[in-house]
Amino acid sequence: MSPTVYPLEVISRPAARTATKATLLALAVALVSACGTLDFDPASEAPTDASVPETGTFADARVDAGPDATPDAQVDAGPARMAVSHPRELRAAWVASVFNLDWPSRQGLTAAAAQAELTTLLDALVAAGANAAFLQVRPESDALYDSALEPWSRFLSGTQGASPGWDPLRFAIDQAHARGLELHAWLNPFRAATNASLPLAPTHVATRLAEHAHLYGSTVTMDPGSPAVRDHVVAVVRDIVSRYDVDGVVFDDYFYPYPIAGTPYPDDATYADYQAGGGSLSRSAFRRANVDAFVHAAHLAIRAARPGTRFGVSPFGIYRPGQPTGVVGLDAYEALAADSLAWLAAGDVDYLAPQLYWPTTSTGQPFASLAAWWSSKTAAAGKWLVPALDLTKAGTTNWDLGEYRAQVSAVRGLAGSGARGATLYAARNLLRDTGGVGTLFRTELWARPALPPPLADATGRVEPPTVRLRGDVAELSHDDARIRGFAVYRVDGPPALDRWIRARTASVTLERGSWAISAVDAQGLESDGAVLTNP
């Protein structure tokens, strides 16, 4: 049933009541005159008889305008309120900078060209219905932002350490927020170089902590067993969250590197140091403990630097073979030292985005079964599941548009047990409309807008915004500096989210009809809607 919206009426009392008060006042004056001098002003002591009920309809809330009020006198008591909500989902796209996969398209672009590419990409995400961008800002222990801790990325200028002359992360945040998108900083924690043959800048962590930088295959990785390495990456996270208005931080699946057959990872030195200090864990348990300690420290740094910032990890899609029954594949728990369930149990992550890059038709890695398994684990911990879907295969065998419909449907079917949207790899496939997948999300799967869900441990209450309608323009403001933006609902029928605007946007143009505008804070908590009608 559609909620009924009532205007807040403010009217004067009937003239008969005013006349009655005047008659009583005259009798009182006459009585006092007969008895002596009047030592108080009867007008100042006259009761107002105001009556604004705590419950009931807005039509029952009436205020006495006083005996001098004309029948047209009104008191501005503010707009009515109504409860508003909608199904909330995190709808993100991964924007890869490594190898110039998504953005920038090549090294050495001018600032103007790189900025134009990025705004075009963000526009494509908005058109597809996304509400967040996961921008890779640290692909190989470098920076796509102005950093005193790490060198500029070679994927910008072509030379590691060479400044591009502008700050891509700050620009990306401004442009994303202007479009109503969240911006999550995507970091690769321990990858130091994708190509070991290329020179590293003097300020690179693999240069400064060379004893903990290991050549493994053709890449260089930093040893997670080194406290100095872990502390450095946590300092990088803290620096980003402290200086940039990012909405979230997300790590991908690269902790200990994917194993190379016949080549053990060369962490003998850090494991020997651990044993020399009295440690008794097996090497695989030692590695997991290192990653767990790192994830926990990153969580604490983020919470301390900017409360409300989301923190997520995108692990390999299989936790362990046989979980759930019938699943086969890489054992991330052993091979990558990635104990995702430990991070959930410790409350260190707000969401997991496991990389479920298999079709629903797979027998060894069935999408729906894996999604349900992950959802059961995140739900038990009170966290979100936002699985990563593979758009790079769109249009190939077993990956027609029906496959993506099935995957999104499977995830939405788990909404009651912690599933809260999806993340799409990669943004370029939405931009290029690979196999029609961009059109599918724009016109069907993400056609109706949605806000990301609130933090699972969010607390407090949010008050509605102050709204003033001037013609067709609603002017918005809020006293709480923690407000991130405003959700605009059409309420001619059941409340339906129409759009989302960031808090720095002070106004919104409304068509004719009834509207409700709520405020959303940094935790994602939403207020009631302030109701207004544009006649």
Image (cartoon, rainbow, N blue to C red):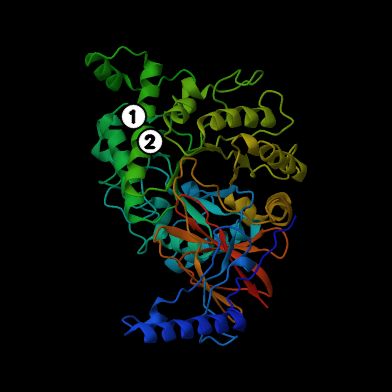
Circle 1: element type: loop
- Amino acid type shown at disc 1: Asp
Across the whole image, how many numbered discs are drawn on residues? 2
Which label belongs to residue 223? 1
Is 468 drawn above or below residue 373 in the view shown? below
Pick the quarter of the image with the C terminus. Answer: bottom right
- Amino acid type shown at disc 2: Phe
Q: Position of residue 339 (x, y in %)?
A: 46, 25
What residue sits 60% from the left and 49% below the top?
88
Is 336 drawn above or below residue 352 in the view shown? above
Is 410 drawn above or below residue 104 in the view shown? above
Which label belongs to residue 190? 2
Is 46 drawn above or below residue 132 in the view shown? below
Whether the residues at callouts 2 and 1 have beta carbons within 8 Å, the answer is yes
Left or right? Give the position of 80 relative to 31. right
What residue sits 30% from the left and 48% below the top?
150
Pick the quarter of the image with the N terminus. Answer: bottom right
> Is residue 268 among what the camera can see?
yes
Q: CA distance from mark 2 to mark 1?
A: 7 Å
Considering only order in the chain, which callout, 1 or 2, is on the residue closer to the N terminus?
2
What residue sits 67% from the left and 18% below the top?
326
Q: Position of residue 35 (x, y in %)?
A: 36, 82
Question: In terms of depth relative to the viewer, which is nearer, 298 or 141?
Answer: 298
Quarter holding residue 256: top left
Question: In terms of depth relative to the viewer, which is nearer, 530 or 203?
Answer: 530
Left or right? Give the position of 494 relative to 340. right
Q: Position of residue 50 (x, y in %)?
A: 51, 70
